[in-house]
Image: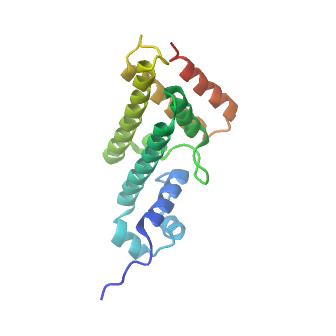
Amino acid sequence: MARSKEFEENVVLDKAMKLFWEQGYEKTSLTDLVEHMGIHRRSLYDTFGDKHTLFLKAMDRFRDKVNAGLTGEVKRSKTAAEALQLIFSFMIDGEEDSPSGCLMVNSAVELAMRDADVDLKSTESFALSEQLLKDIILWGQQDGEFTSNTDAGELAEHLHTVCVGLRVMTRTSTPKEKLQRIANLSIKLLDK
């Protein structure tokens, strides 16, 4: 008779996600995962498949959680500039009890050149981020906050590249004040 699962799948997936985020794919062993997730090796295989499949599911979980969180913050913003400031603050400060940087950025740097699945998931996530930025920029252009002299899509590509750079820099000893200056200048460049 099959045993029932003694764990909540998303809870242990979040634990795997944070471990991959902190250590990267290559440095994270199956033993690390089993210990950190608090499940048996057999349960890991039965529920998530192999390490690579678990990693891809962790990337999906990260994308969904971050996208939902940022979209909610944007909807609560009163102005487009406020929405961008919230996004940049998230890029710099991250979430409480989470590793610094970004699982998608880290994964793209570590694996995208040699892993088509990671490349696809990273680029899809980056496209979602760019679309969110484009929507905010269009909002700001329509309300007269931001310049309309440059295409919103091109501005979004630029801001997304700044965001990726900030996520990388948060993993270094660069002072947050410097990162905030970069973010502020990026928003100021959109001013009318």
Q: In the rendered view, does 9 fall on the left or right side of 170? A: left
Residue 113 visible in the shown view = no
Q: Is residue 135 above or below residue 63?
A: above
Q: Residue 188 at what x, y percent from top left?
A: 56, 19
Q: In the rendered view, does 1 fall on the left or right side of 6? A: left
Residue 106 visible in the shown view = yes
* Residue 155, image quadrant: top left
Q: What residue is at 49 percent from the left and 65 percent from the top? A: 33
* Residue 168, image quadrant: top right
Between 25 and 179, the one lying in front of the other is 179
Q: In the rendered view, does 182 fall on the left or right side of 18? A: right
* Residue 90, image quadrant: top right
Residue that lies at the very extreme toward the bottom in this rendered image: 1
Q: What residue is at 55 percent from the left and 38 percent from the top? A: 91
Q: What residue is at 47 percent from the left and 74 percent from the top? A: 39
Q: Residue 136 at what x, y percent from top left?
A: 43, 29
Q: Residue 74 at what x, y percent from top left?
A: 47, 37
Q: How many dots with numbers?
A: 0
Quarter holding the N terminus is bottom left
Between 162 and 171, the one lying in front of the other is 162
Q: Residue 147 at what x, y percent from top left?
A: 46, 14
Q: What residue is at 53 percent from the left and 70 percent from the top? A: 35
